[in-house]
Amino acid sequence: MNPIVKTLAILLLTNFGCRLFVDPPTSITTKIDGVDADSVVWVDGQTKTVTCEAIGGSPTPTVSLIRDGTELVSGTGSVSRDIAQTKSMNPVVIQCEATNVAIDNPITDQTTINVLYPPSSGPDITGYTGQVLTEGVPPTTVTVTCTVGEASPVPTLTWNCPVGSSSTGSNTHVISINRSIDGVTCTCSGSQSGTGWTRTDSVTFTVHYGPDSVTIDGNKRVYTGELLTLSCDNADSNPGVTYQWTKKGAVLTGQTQQTLTSSYSKNDNNAVIACTAVNSGTGTTATGSVSLTVDYGPDRAEITG
Ligand SMILES: *[C@@H]1O[C@H](CO)[C@@H](O)[C@H](O)[C@H]1NC(C)=O
């Protein structure tokens, strides 16, 4: 075409004909994997397809996809591009632009993307590392705290602990130390919406306790020379106990079982038999005792008169 004619045609179209033959685009939409960009859930590392599409406009608008100020792609009517987004890029501004001869400035749609990412660590329970606790020995409480590494969105932490109590609005759990928590497991569960991340940590308490008391079971009355078995019972203790029997305050060497089987002489009448149970971990002791009645006959029969 003759350049002069071409110039005239363009002048005619843009300066005189535009109000009649051209229309600006009415809008531009940004879609990510087919859904509205503002409602997208984008997780660290995911690649998603971003689409810019002009609605209306004559001639068909030129559309551009711009990320953080850099144009990635442009085309006519609609453009798409696969974008990989990681948390180190947060936040990323995605801008769609549409323009045609009917407007001086493109119409734009801007979306700020912050990808979601799970915590790099945790949940972690601190405050108890498996050490042996002892009932009645300070500290009287143990405070366990559940924490989780930085994440977006902030994960929800939930204690599942059959003992103690949680202070409202904190991830801390306070538990009294006594025998009822020996062997008890407390779990902290973390979960994160959007990413589907879930993880747990747990602790199991060990408490040493007892024995508080012992009882001695068996007959307290015996004939001389007769075998009698006494039993040292109810030594509730963790860890278990060892036993030591005594008679009249003197250690009965070798009598370290729960039961004592022995015979007694006339001299043992009213003797105190005692059993001491010793917690093999803490050394705590409990002692029980009985006073024995030893029946005996006449030493010999004497005939007098
Ligand atoms: C023993 O510890 C449990 C758990 O912490 C607590 O609920 C309970 O009240 C304690 N019992 C006593 C007698 O202190």
Image: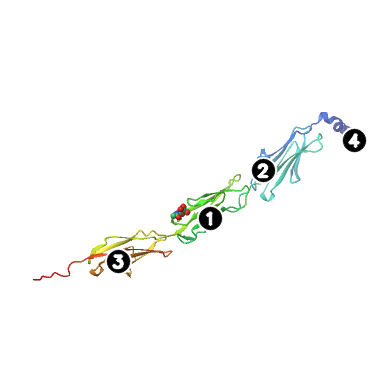
Label 2 Cα neighbours within 10 Å, binned few <14 / some 14-19 / many ≥20? some
Q: Is mark 1 in CB contact (under 8 Å) with mark 2?
A: no
Label 1 to label 3: alpha-carbon separation: 48 Å
Instruction: Give the residue type at disc 2.
Output: Lys
Residue at the spot of label 3: 272
Q: Residue at x 30, y 66 (%)?
A: 272
Residue 3, disc: 4
**The residue carrying mark 2 has its beta carbon less than 8 Å from ligand 1:** no
Instruction: Give the residue type at disc 4.
Output: Pro
Q: Is mark 4 in CB contact (under 8 Å) with mark 2?
A: no
**Front position among marks 4 and 3:** 3
**Front position among marks 2 and 3:** 3
**Front position among marks 4 and 1:** 1
- Say which label, 2 or 3, has the lower sequence index: 2
The residue most toward the left is 305
Instruction: Give the residue type at disc 3.
Output: Val
The residue most toward the front is 305
Label 1 to label 2: alpha-carbon separation: 41 Å
The residue most toward the top is 20
User: How far across and down, in percent of the image, does residue 163 sit?
Assistant: 48, 52
The C terminus lies in quadrant: bottom left
Instruction: Give the residue type at disc 1.
Output: Val
Q: Is mark 4 in CB contact (under 8 Å) with mark 1?
A: no
Residue 32 as seen in the image, left or right of residue 132:
right
* SS label for mark 3: strand
Residue at the spot of label 1: 144
User: How far across and down, in percent of the image, does residue 206 sit?
Assistant: 46, 58
- Say which label, 1 or 3, has the lower sequence index: 1
Residue at the spot of label 2: 48
